Amino acid sequence: MNKIWRAGLTALLLGCVLLAPAARATGRAECASLPSKILGRAVPYCVLLPPSYDTEKTRHYPILYLLHGLGDNDQMLVHSGGMNLVEDLWEQHQLGEFLIVTPAAGASFYINSRDGRHRYEDFFLREFIPGVEKRYRAQAGRASRGIAGISMGGYGALHIAFRHPQLFAAVGALSAALIEKLPNIRAQNSLQLSQLRVLGDAFGSPFDAAFWNQNDPLIIARTAHLAGLKIYFACGSEDDYGFDSGAEALDKLLTSRHIPHEFHLYPGGHNWSFFAEHLPAMLAFEFQAFESTPRQLR
């Protein structure tokens, strides 16, 4: 789903770079790996460090965990041109400074898999967040921590934040893999078949509908205690996988529960141009949450 995005966004931003004047100090990406006992291997990740990180040695920063989509990896911002986009926002003072961390997640959907062999959610919460925040100068506490994602990563961000709202100030999602009505395993409809292919093996092989329901952000949101969690999500009205219906269902559910949130249904599909156009707004929402969350919640 994200190969088209990478190619298109890179071409778009290359033109901007060639026309731009010489820039002052910018942020930088640092890519490494974190060993995991839970997964039994090292997990690659990249962190985008803001312009002042190397000069203001005692400064600590809010941190955003940005989760990639299916078919992408930890270098989603580096090889897509997204890093250039973020740096431009920083240089133009259109976005406050914070750390942006993207871990590799394969096709895990950021959950503990049905077969129990790939406990990605446990890794992320118990090893990855503590490990990263120990290595980098991250501000401590919920008020300075956000999570967001695109497509599969949007599903993961909503799933994790709704299950663990005490850990995050805000959650954001672009074109999250939300499915209002679960497709039949014998589906003949082309849209339903594409949804089943996207879900892969994380939810069982054959697909386990009950396990899907246990992890579905739409179902978790029915009863989750979401007070204090700032919520942002957007989707294209012509989403190629029909995720717009799921996004609208989440909007209706949160509205019925009187849970404050920001939802946008914009023209567009499930592609790089949509993600690139709306990524800045999601990042700005996250930073505003860092700035506005009461200090006593830190």
Image (cartoon, helix red, strand yellow):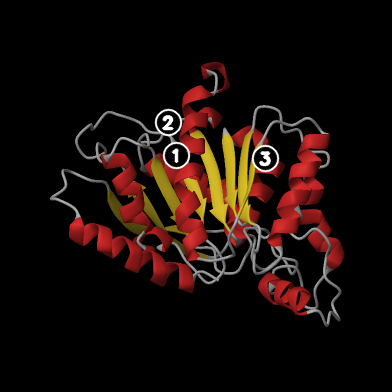
The residue labelled by disc 2 is 139
Q: Name the residue tied to disc 3.
A: 164
Q: Please state if 137 lies on the left or on the right of 37 as rendered.
A: left
Q: Name the residue under label 1.
A: 63
- As measured in the structure, the alpha-carbon distance from the residue carrying label 2 to the one carrying label 3 is 19 Å
Q: What element carries label 2?
A: loop
Pick the front one: 285 or 44: 285
**Mark 1 belongs to which amino acid?**
Ile
**Badge 1: how crowded within 10 Å, few (<14), some, or many (20+)?**
many
Regarding residue 79, the answer to whether it shows in the image is no
For the residues labelled 2 and 1, the Cα–Cα distance comes to: 7 Å
Residue 94 at what x, y percent from top left? 35, 37
Q: What residue type is labelled 3?
A: His
What residue appears at the point 68 percent right and 74 percent down from the top-left corner?
A: 200
- From the viewer's perspective, is 73 left or right of 210? left
Label 3, residues with CA under 10 Å away: few <14, some 14-19, many ≥20: some
Q: Is residue 84 visible?
A: yes
